Amino acid sequence: MYTEEDITSAVDAGVLSQETAQAFRAHVAGLRQGPAVDEEHFRLVTGFNDIFVVIASLLLLVSVGGIASVLADWIGAAAVAAVAWLLAEFFTRRRRMALPSIVLLLVFVSSVLSGAFLLPVPWQEAQSLAIACALATLAAWLHWRRFQVPITVAAGAAAIVGFAIALLLWAVPGARYWLSVIAFIAGVLVFLLAMYWDTRDTARLTRKSDVAFWLHLLAAPLLVHPVFAALGVFEGQMDLWRAAVVIVLYMAIGFISLCIDRRALMVSALVYVMYAFSTLLEQYGVVSLSFALTALVIGSALLLLSAFWHASRAQVLRRVPQAVQRWLVPAR
C-alpha cells in the first residue's frame, strides 16, 4: 500500500517523474471514480504488521510502567515515556510504520502529562494540570522535531488547550462556569490552525494534509459539543423548535464540511443529531423504534451525500467567493 507521501518522495528522489506520478494518480482516481484530492487520505495501517507491533509495544509499555510504578507512580509514567521514545526511534524514524507511530506518540505525550501531574509537589490541582500540560506541549514539540508524525501537532494543540484552560481556572476559579464557551473558542482557534495547514497543501499530496486532518478531528468536538449542549440536547429538552434548530445547524455544518472537504465536523455532530431526534420521537410515543428510524433516515442521507460528495462540493463552491475558493481544496 503506497500513500501520496510515498509517491511524492519517489518523485523527489528521481525514481518517478512528475508526469508518471500524475498519470498514476489519475489512473487510481479513475478506478475509484473520484478524484484522489477529495478522498481525504491519511496513513493509519500499512499492513497487519502494524497491528502486531502495536500489540507487542503496548504489552511492553504496560509491563515497564507496572514495574517502574512500584517505586512511584510518576516514575512509572516517566519510564513509559522513555521506552515509547526509544521504540519510536526504530518503528517511526527507521521503519516509518503508520499505526505504531501514532500509538507511540500518544503514549509518549500522555505519559509525560500524567507523570508531571503525579509529581509529589504541594500544588493546587489546576496548577498541577497547567504545568503538566505545558510539559506535554514541550514533549509534543520535541517529538515533532525528531519524528514529524502528523498527529503530533494535534496532540500538542490539545495540550496547549488544556494548559490554557487549567491556567485560566487557576487564575479565575469562576471560569469553570464558562467552560463551554472556552471550549468553543478553543475549537475555533484549532479549526483556524487546521485550515492553515490545509491551505499549505490544497492538492493534499504531502504530510501537511495529514496534519490538518488530525487538527480537524480535534477541533470538531470542541466546536460541536458546546453548541448542542447549549440547546439542551442531552438534558431531554427536545421539542419541535429545538429539532428544527438542530437540523439547521447540521446543514450549516454540512455546508462548511463540503467547502473545506473535511468530514470530521459532520461525524462529530452526528451523535447529537441522532440523540436529539431519537428523544423527539420518544416524546411522540415512538419508543421502541425511535433510534432505528433515526439511524435509517440519517444513515441513508449520509450515504447519499457520500455517493454524490464531489458533485455536491462543485455546487457548493460555485456559491463561495473566488477570494475564498483559492484557499480551499479545488473541486475536481
Image: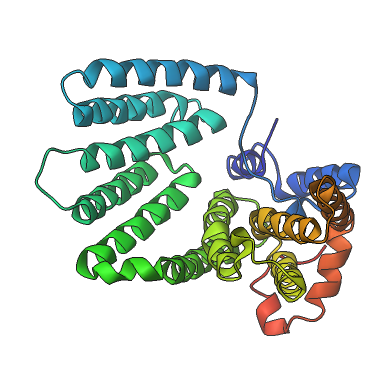
Q: Is residue 201 visible?
A: no
Please state the horizontal and vertical placement of residue 254, each as a whole percent of the image. 74, 66
> How was this image coloured?
rainbow
Q: Is residue 128 visible?
A: yes
Q: Quarter holding the N terminus?
A: top right
Q: Residue furthest front?
A: 285
Please state the horizontal and vertical placement of residue 144, each as a whole percent of the image. 39, 45
Is 158 left or right of 205, judged from the image as shown? left
Residue closest to the eye, 95 or 183? 183
Q: Quarter holding the C terminus?
A: bottom right
Is 98 left or right of 24, judged from the image as shown? left
Residue drawn at the location 80% of the way across and 81% of the way down? 319
Residue 164 occupies which quadrant of the picture? Answer: bottom left
Q: How many marks?
A: 0
Residue drawn at the location 47% of the way across and 32% of the way down? 103
Residue drawn at the location 65% of the way across and 62% of the way down? 202
Please state the horizontal and vertical placement of residue 178, each as a whole percent of the image. 39, 71
Residue closest to the eye, 11 or 248? 248
Please state the horizontal and vertical placement of residue 191, each as a whole percent of the image. 53, 65
Residue closest to the eye, 239 or 297? 239
Is 70 left or right of 307, judged from the image as shown? left
Instruction: Relative to 325, say whether 176 is above or below.
Output: above
Residue drawn at the location 53% of the way across and 62% of the way down? 194
Q: Residue furthest left?
A: 122
Instruction: Relative to 295, say whether 16 is above or below.
Output: above
Residue 247 occupies which quadrant of the picture? Answer: bottom right
